[in-house]
Image (cartoon, rainbow, N blue to C red):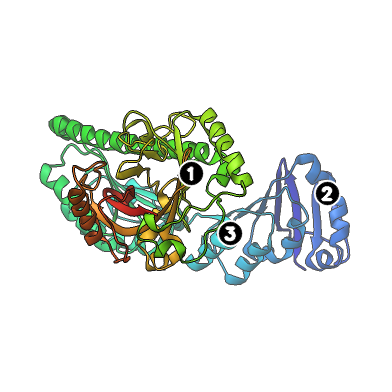
Amino acid sequence: METIKIRFYGNVMYITYANSYQGNVNTCRMTEYNEFFFSKEYLEKHSDTLQFYITPIIVKNQVTKVIVSHNPLLPYIEKIINLYPTIHELYIEQDKEITISEAQVIMAMKFVNDVNCYDIEENIYYKLLNEYHKNVNTRVEILFESIFMVQNQINTYSTLYQKKQVYINNEFNEIDKQEFSYFLAHNRLLEKIMINRYSESTMKYIISTVKQRNILISILNDEQLTEQNYKYLRSLKKHSKIQLELSYSKQYQHKNALKQLNLNLLRFCMILVVFVCVGFASAEHFIFEKDKQEIESIDLTKYEDIVEEPEIEENTLENIEDPEQIETPTPTYVSPYYQTYTQTFTELKGINPDTIGWIKVNNTNVNYPVVKTTDNEYYLNHSFDRTENTFGWIYADYRSNFDELNQNTIIYGHNVLGTNLLLSTLETVVSPDWYNNPINLTITFNTEKENMKWQVFSIYTIPVTNDYLITNFNSPDSFLNFAQKLKDRSIKDFGVTINGTDKILTISTCYKDSSSRVVIHAKRI
């Protein structure tokens, strides 16, 4: 009858055979030395009784390790080991390779994570490591002959399997090459090869052997490296898929210090330029959003009745060519519009004394008060409330006269890309959908003294020029020549006749970017 013996030595539980035990299959004997003797049959039938006896000892001694004398005992002790979470180390004394069935028993030991055995097959080793997270160390020695294996202390299969980084301190001979190839063929965990003594022939052999594996090759500070060696390594790093880490020797660094300084300075300057550009872009974006919010916060909706005049009969305006044809009726009724008109302008001037009028262009967002000052610069970067703002405001040319209109009254404003503010939506006037709609061709521009309608006769885009920014003319012929030039530029002939005494309105803003303009000309009707 085969008998099993359990004995405790401090935090170690030792399990072996006890052939001298005299008893029967249904008994378990305990000695004064904390030794337990029992048969395999007893263990199978009465493991709970054995547990009752040994648990106090395991708890008291804080047992963490089990030593098993023979491989065949493993299936019998699995059930015992799995009862105690503190037991995480297994040492198998017998100098015999672990079989597949024995390995399966070890896999079932749920708390054991460190195993020491004589030998184990490679695939089983990696299965225990990768799938069951058990670290296996083997004792059987391998007699390698290469300097590479000796220097990296690879003398057992477990050390061969476990190596994650190795050193190369010499130029490879044929034996080194053979055993390095053997090492790579059986090791699946290698992450890094560190080369202390560089040899181009060894380097080429390593590259050919490593092939597609994800292994970092690190060239350390070898003073024997030449400029030609560095050139080859840099080319290799740039043009191959090999992961290469290159450290420059002190000698090389000293020799190339000035070049490196210039390169570092160039890198620093490039980084500085990037930071500056990002800073400017961020600042511009911040200013853009702030100015946009400020413009949007100016509430002028209650003043929009300035342009809401009594309706004129359809087609009346577009058929009038001579203002003298208009008969002045005798006023019999004063609209509430006219009663509040002066009051509205008074309120607007209370916000900004430079207010001179209000302009509205149908089917665009242009519906704003117009200001005027002593130059054409101030309202490029000041809003209606006269605070600084990159969006500016809509303003009349400083040469404009609103006591008696110039023959060409000019209005400017920014096209703020990415918004619908100020004159930004005037880009739509070059679309056929806009200029083929008759409603859009009548512009309202009112002043404190007059409410006026203007008939569009020319629309175009043009590179930056000031030849259409003339306000007064020497003679009717001069004005007619000017008006004809504007009509010739138009994207459409609107069929509007201009005479020498007419007065026109010009609206100008940027088109797409600051290098071109979109311009609208309309005749007062």
Q: Helix, strand or loop at disc 2?
A: helix
Q: Earlier in the sequence, mark 3 or mark 1?
A: 3
Residue of label 3: 94
Q: Is residue 475 left or right of residue 336?
A: left
> Is any part of residue 95 visible from this angle?
no
Going from N to C along the chain, the mark reached first, 2 or 1, is 2
* Side (left or right) of 346 relative to 231: right
Mark-to-mark CA distance, 3 and 1: 98 Å
Q: Nearer the viewer, residue 312 or 241?
A: 312
Q: Mark number for residue 55?
A: 2
Quick check: 322 left or right of 169?
Answer: right
In terms of image quadrants, where is residue 382?
Answer: top left
**What's the residue type where badge 1 is placed?**
Tyr
- Within-10-Å neighbours for mark 3: few <14, some 14–19, many 20+: some
Residue 237 picture location, percent across and down:
24, 52
Nearer to me, 415 or 503: 503
